[in-house]
Image (cartoon, rainbow, N blue to C red):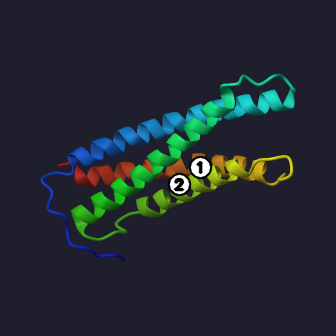
Amino acid sequence: MLTLLTLNLPSFLWLWKIAAWSMGVSLFAYGCLAVTGLGLRYTRQTERRRPLWLRPLHFGLGGTLVALVLLLLAIGLMGTLGYYGTLGHSGHLPAGLTVVSLTLLSAWSATRIAPHRPWARPLHIAANLLLLVGFLSVSLTGWSVVQKYLP
């Protein structure tokens, strides 16, 4: 268990508001990634012409999701250490670290997708399916964490 000095900040409410918005936007981005990913798959399988904006949109949404998940990690670590002085008070930490890991795995595997790397696309899709389970887990455990901080 990691122990640090408690931060002397007046209130962590502002931090939790940023986290709540970031989580909401992350889930929205994940949904948009699913839709655009299915669009990419559809155009590939039907050999239809792909709209020029679809792939850059999918990559942009993916980069946004990575940034939001890393922001959520920083908020969670800073808030928990600031409030308690230690980490590991619930199952939210392992759930969050799993989501961060799966998000980074998904992003990395996306950059590897190419005809000469047939393993990359299935890995990318599997990571994203597992990420759905991770988001559900982190949402449920996060709700219990939020209840600890509210008066």
Amino acid identity at mark 2: Val
Measured as percent of width and height from the top left, residue 129 is found at 66, 47
Q: Which residue is mark 2?
A: 99
Amino acid identity at mark 1: Leu
Front-lying residue, 39 or 89: 39
Q: Is residue 37 left or right of residue 131?
A: right
CB contact under 8 Å: marks 2 and 1: yes
Front-lying residue, 80 or 69: 69
Measured as percent of width and height from the top left, residue 141 is found at 42, 53
Which quadrant of the view contains residue 81? bottom left
Measured as percent of width and height from the top left, residue 138 is found at 46, 52
Which quadrant of the view contains residue 48? top right
* Residue at position x 72%, y 28% in the image: 39
Label 2 sits on a secondary structure element that is: helix
The answer to which of marks 2 and 1 sits earlier in the sequence is: 2
Q: Which mark is residue 81?
A: none
Front-lying residue, 56 or 35: 56
Give me the C-alpha separation between circle 2 and circle 1. Answer: 6 Å
Which quadrant of the view contains residue 75? bottom left
Front-lying residue, 103 or 133: 103
Q: Which residue is mark 1?
A: 131
**Image quadrant where one finds the N terminus:** bottom left
